[in-house]
Amino acid sequence: MSASASVTKSVADTAFTRTFGVDVPLVQGGMQWIARAGLVAAVAEAGGLGFLSALTQPSPEDLSREIARTHELTDRPFGVNLTVLPTIEPRPYDEYRAAIIESGVTVVETAGSDPTPHIEHFARHGVRVIHKCTSVRHALRAQAAGAAAVTVDGFECAGHPGEDDIPGLVLVPAVARRLDIPVIACGGFADGAGLVAALALGADAICMGTRFLCTEESPAHPNVKRAIVAASERDTELIFRPLRNTSRVASNAVSRTVVASLAAGAGFDGVRELVSGARGRQVFDGGDLEAGVWSVGMAQGLIDDVPDVATLVDRIMAQAHAIVCGLAS
Ligand code: NAD
């Protein structure tokens, strides 16, 4: 094997790719409203591991149909994200869990509250769990509960970064040095430099949401993709901070109003209508960027195009390869 081929292999051949049987150490996070069959299958076909978002589907039966659609589009591995956080309407998590198991999916990404009961239940049915968390203590708990891997979300991430505000530069190695299972770095990643940095910090893969949201196969309205390309890393807001359910979303009139209302003492009931996922969906589906709050990460400051998924994956791996070769020489 040439030195160059050997470097390419070393970037792609990690504990993550070996454990999950994929070609490249790239994960597409289970984004609400975005992570549907077309995007997930495109990521799988490009050699990465994509996750459908379970709660994007209005019912467990709809989730079963979306999983079947994804199976029709690819015979490569993919998974399902099950997020357990406060919701406006209670969700039947047990039924979503059953739909996942019955569909033959073999890897699940859990996120949010203590995953122990889910990990144990999925394990009894031969489903491996990657738990997404935002602290060393939660990563250790997930490993002890039997998680096959953890995704560690740094403060840069879209959606829920937790309450500790530890960026990936510290959080990823702090987790990696304590865990035996594969670690996936998440939050702020959008290119090959990020992949190499994550591997250097002890991670075995990177997970990207915003970067995959801004691809041709993503179902987000073109206005959303254009807004991400135009935005800088400064254009996000942290909502729900006083409620200890912090979430990073795009900066717009709605999110700034929510921040101001909660800071002025409003409770969740005072902002419920503004923050509902149903309104966020209008942004992604209809392209009205002011229709509601919508999740996006600081990585938007690194994104300046809308490639197809295969081109993006090839580019990231080529960038990583060139950087590692450059460092080696
Ligand atoms: P939703 O419409 O039920 O709620 C909208 C937002 O309000 C969510 O962020 C939710 O966590 C928050 N929320 C609801 N009740 C709350 C309460 N009592 N106190 C504080 N915050 C409260 O949610 P949705 O948009 O349909 O999303 C479904 C699930 O996916 C939620 O659990 C949501 O948090 C999660 N989600 C995760 C991400 C991410 O980090 N990847 C992004 C978007 C949504």
Image (cartoon, grey):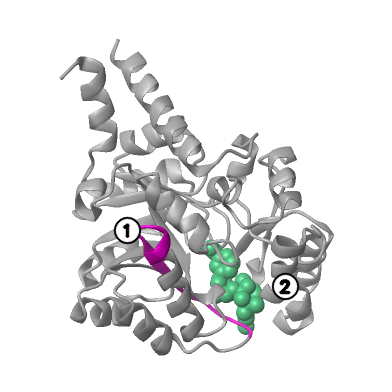
Q: Secondary structure at mark 2?
A: helix
Query: Can residue 175 be seen in the rendering of this structure?
Result: no
Q: Which residues are magenta?
A: 71-88
Where residue 104 appears, as percent x and y from the top left, is 29, 74
Q: Residue at x 32, y 62 (%)?
A: 139
Q: Which residue is mark 2?
A: 275
In the image, farthest residue toward the front = 72
Ligand 1 is found in which quarter of the picture? bottom right
Is residue 79 within the magenta segment? yes
**What kind of residue is marked 2?**
Val
Which residue is painted at 43% across and 79% down in the image?
64
Which quadrant of the figure has residue 180? bottom left
Q: Is residue 161 left or right of residue 227?
A: left
Q: How many neighbours does mark 2 have within 10 angstroms: few (below 14), some (14-19), or many (20 or more)?
A: many
Nearer to the camera, 299 or 68: 68
Q: Which mark is residue 112?
A: none
Residue 264 spot, x, y in % from top left: 81, 71
Callout 2: CB less than 8 Å from ligand 1: yes
Q: Quadrant of residue 276?
A: bottom right
Give yes or no for residue 244 being in the magenta stretch: no
Indicate the quadrant containing the C terminus: top left, top right, bottom left or bottom right: top left
In the displayed structure, 94 sits above or below 31; it is below
**Residue 329 can be seen in this image:** yes
